[in-house]
Amino acid sequence: MEIVNQRIADPKLYADNEAYHALFARIRREEPVLWAQPEGYVPFWIVSKHADIMEIERQAAIFINRPRGMLQSIADTDRIKEQQGGSRLMVDTIVSMDGEDHKQYRGLTRDWFLPKNVGKLEEGIRDIARDYIDKMIARGNSCDFVKDVAKWFPLRVITKILGVPAADEPQILQMAMESFGFADPDIAKDTAMATRFRAMREFFAYFTTVLEDRRASTKDDLASVIANGTIGGQQIGRFEALSYYVIVASAGHDTTSSSISGGLLALIQHPKEMERLRSEPELMKVAVEEIFRWVSPVKHFFRTATRDYELRGRLIKEGDSLMMCYPSANFDEAVFDAPEIFRIDRTPNRHVAFGFGPHQCLGQPLARLEASVFLEELLKRIDNVRLTGAPSWMEASLVSGLKSMPVRYEAALSVKA
């Protein structure tokens, strides 16, 4: 399908949900494992079906992250290699690692994100949620929910976990936005790659201070765990530690922010579902899973075959790259009944918004708790939420979500306990 070659690498596609889902419905129907050759890119396979993504993700020894983790042009890859002394990576994190390296580096922070430990944070997270809803009410009856609330709430949670000052949050937010939204004309201050390089330099400069501080004086925070982590009895390297900070600080809040704002938009657009959730708050955990399926903020990751492999009758050759399209999998008609319908009581809901297999998102228990707590508090205290303008989405092919959503609302006359 030539239209795929024209559109798959265009960041604008990922800012248009209707166009994205229409294109991928056709791909799933006509050629679910599709060879794509967009101009200026090394060709790759598009994997659009839920079952195929799960098949690949569970076989991490056959389908690896390196050397190609994301959709990136040949020219941009060459620029990175030139800047990084031959490396294709700006950062080296658990997202890009394979095998034993991935297992050991993931293990450094695994305990912090176990459900039993994340659960201990609920009271503090609820206090933060209430604080931001207080701010909504103090604004009167309108705000840009993305810019004024959704971007900040999960950022405050992650800065508290890391142990960095709340006063630094505007700087961290700007760096994170430029890390993921470097192709968006409203975010980029220069060319896309110049914006991305600058964001990484600023991230590394900021976290160098954090790293040095925690190595000099350990504290009870995640920044200290990363700074003083050891692999094979050796303290992790500076580049690896700084990369770890970057992924926690950026992905640790951006995907949750996108899910909360996208979830509220879905509830606004489906008022019966919002009223049902308000009257049946016991559905919140199930509703949040539907929100993650519906929003799917991580649009793709790449895997590379280490040997020949047949997938849905297509020969994937050793060295071929595969683009795992998670939103497409989450709208797969073979798995989800009427996937185009937003339904807060959808069960079962085997979405892959957090990935699948060994690389499944480490922070998913925290993301689930944040989304549940925030929406619980919002629905208790805010009534009659409606749009006052057209929402807009970030133009980004890797991780993206709403970048603006103007709303009006009223403070609830009575607050449910």
Image (cartoon, rainbow, N blue to C red):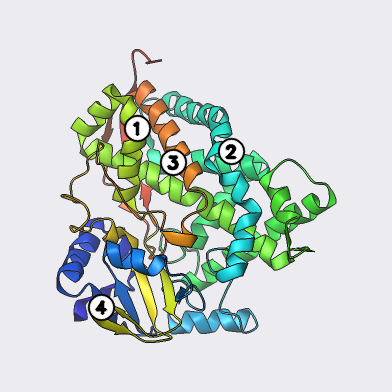
Query: Mark number for residue 368?
Result: 3
Q: Is residue 330 above or below residue 197?
A: above
**Residue contact at pointers 3 and 2, CB within 8 angstroms:** no
Q: Amino acid at mark 1?
A: Met
Task: Say whether residue 338 is left or right of residue 263.
Answer: left
Give the structural element (helix, strand or loop) at label 1.
helix
**Residue contact at pointers 3 and 4, CB within 8 angstroms:** no
How far apart, in angstroms, are the residues tagged by discs 3 and 2? 13 Å
Query: Mark number for residue 117?
Result: 2
Q: Tell me which residue sits at (44%, 60%) in the image.
A: 357
Which of the two labelled residues, at mark 1 and mark 4, occupies the earlier sequence position? 4
Q: Tell me which residue sits at (39%, 41%) in the image.
A: 260
Give the structural element (helix, strand or loop) at label 4.
strand
Q: Tell me which residue sits at (24%, 41%) in the image.
A: 346
Query: Residue 240: x percent and y percent?
Result: 67, 65
Task: Say whether residue 379 is left or right of residue 239.
Answer: left
Which of the two labelled residues, at mark 4 and mark 2, occupies the earlier sequence position? 4
Query: Residue 407: x percent and y percent?
Result: 32, 36
Query: Residue 409: x percent and y percent?
Result: 32, 27
Q: Tell me which residue sits at (58%, 71%) in the image.
A: 90
How far apart, in angstroms, are the residues tagged by discs 1 and 4? 37 Å
Q: Amino acid at mark 2?
A: Asn
Q: Quadrant of residue 372?
A: top left
